[in-house]
Amino acid sequence: MSAVKLAEGLYSVGILNPGLRVFDIVMSTEYGTTYNSFLLKGKEKTVLIECSHLSFFDRYVENIREVCDPSAIDIMILNHTEPDHTGAVARLLELNPNMEIYCSQAASIYIRNITNRADLKLHVVKDGETLDIGGRTLEFRMAPFLHWPDSMFTWLREDQVLFSCDFLGAHYCEPYTWDYNITKPEAYEAAFKGYYDAIFGPFPTYVQKGLDKIADLDIKMVCNSHGPVLTKGCRLEYTKEMYAQWSAPRKNAVPVIPVFYCSAYGNTRRLAERICAGIKKAVPSAETATYDIIKHPMTELAALLNSCDGFAIGSPTLNRDAVPPVWILLSHVDAINSAKRPALIFGSYGWSGEAAANIKARLEGLKMSVFEEPFRVTFVPTEEDYQKAEELGQRFAASFAG
Ligand code: FEO
């Protein structure tokens, strides 16, 4: 993509990456992404807002040169320092070491370690601080945890443009810049929702605060850092509304208590079934069922794991550990919002039975509320073991949902 003029003196100079299929190791990006960056000219100063991914540096500099020489940039504003937006900062500074970097306090620490340069000209901005670049005023609004501690918004008052970095974006790539030019709206919709779930889903209260932070602004254009520019009357209002809905506090109508397990010979499965029966006996209104982890899509199980009121998880012991599907499921725990979530651990084992203790250590590390001691049975459970499993399920459910 070449530089695109968005308004008088405002240009998009970012990068398209249509071939990206995985972002940040774990996030599927079926429709690619963009690394948006913007050049803004005032009468006195020229400002770059967001930088770019290091992999595309040469193309990125070409885009900048279509508007101005990099040496003409006075200030670089970094609303967030994840390396998809800052990977190219160090090399850009080689072309122009005089650029002053405007960013939050947290970002000022991160960007030092990202660039490994001791000569950064850093200006830490305060919430509400303004910058006059000559006929144009930029206002900085702190927006922490959207989605890093360093995040902030930049508001261009005269032009009514919000630079929101990741907030309100989407991993979606088309070469047409604007929301009203999207050629595959259904694909964009899927990318927009998937992006929200992965990046902002863990931070609903901060999303609400972020929306409050811009509620007084009559925004004409959102220049985010991924996907199309959003415009008033097209997708801008809808995007904000969806963020408001998705981040609204919600409570399950009835207690949701899934029982996850893996089982090689049916012993841990049968324990799961009796624990589930005990849960139902103690709290008849509870929505509870057993889930063989290898027989369900992991994304569905992960969503259930992160939205339930409490859960049980069982594993046999293999190679002195819980089995890999159990760890994969637990790797999806939303570490921000899972503290104090009740969890019950169980499993049948043959020789040594380390699975339960290893799961317990993991869940306690996530600050979950592990119920009693893990329930372990050697090889095939007896009728007495099944009875104990059911009673355990009853006590577990009664402890937080009764
Ligand atoms: Fe697009 Fe959090 O970086």
Image (spheres, grey):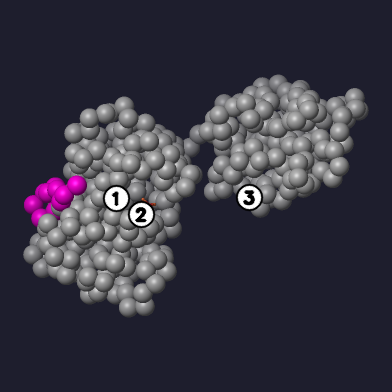
Q: Do the numbered discs 3 and 2 sit on residues whose CB atoms are within 8 Å? A: no
- Is residue 288 highlighted in magenta? no
Label 2 with label 1: CB-CB less than 8 Å? yes
Look at the image and tell me in which quarter the C terminus lies.
Answer: top right
Q: Is residue 154 visible?
A: no
Badge 1: residue crowd in 10 Å (few <14, some 14–19, many ≥20)? many
Residue 341 as seen in the image, left or right of residue 4: right
Q: Where is residue 105, by image quadrant?
A: bottom left
Q: Which three-letter amino acid code belongs to the residue tagged 1?
A: Tyr
The foreground one among 84 and 289 is 84
User: Does 8 appear in magenta?
Assistant: yes
Q: Residue at x 53, y 33 (%)?
A: 299
**Helix, strand or loop at disc 2?**
helix
Residue wearing tag 2: 84
Do the CB atoms of the residues marked 3 and 1 lie less than 8 Å apart? no
Res. 366 mark: 3
Mark 2, ligand 1, within 8 Å: the answer is yes
Query: Alpha carbon of mark 3 to alpha carbon of mark 1: how far?
Result: 32 Å
Say what secondary structure mark 1 lies in.
strand
Residue assigned mark 1? 35
- Mark 2–mark 1 Cα distance, whole angstroms, equals 7 Å
Q: Is residue 186 left or right of residue 276?
A: left
Which residue range is magenta in the image? 1-10
* Location of residue 187 (image quadrant): top left
Query: Which residue is depicted at the point 71% across and 21% down?
Result: 284
Does mark 1's beta carbon lie closer than 8 Å to ligand 1?
yes
Three-letter code for the amino acid on which mark 3 is drawn = Leu
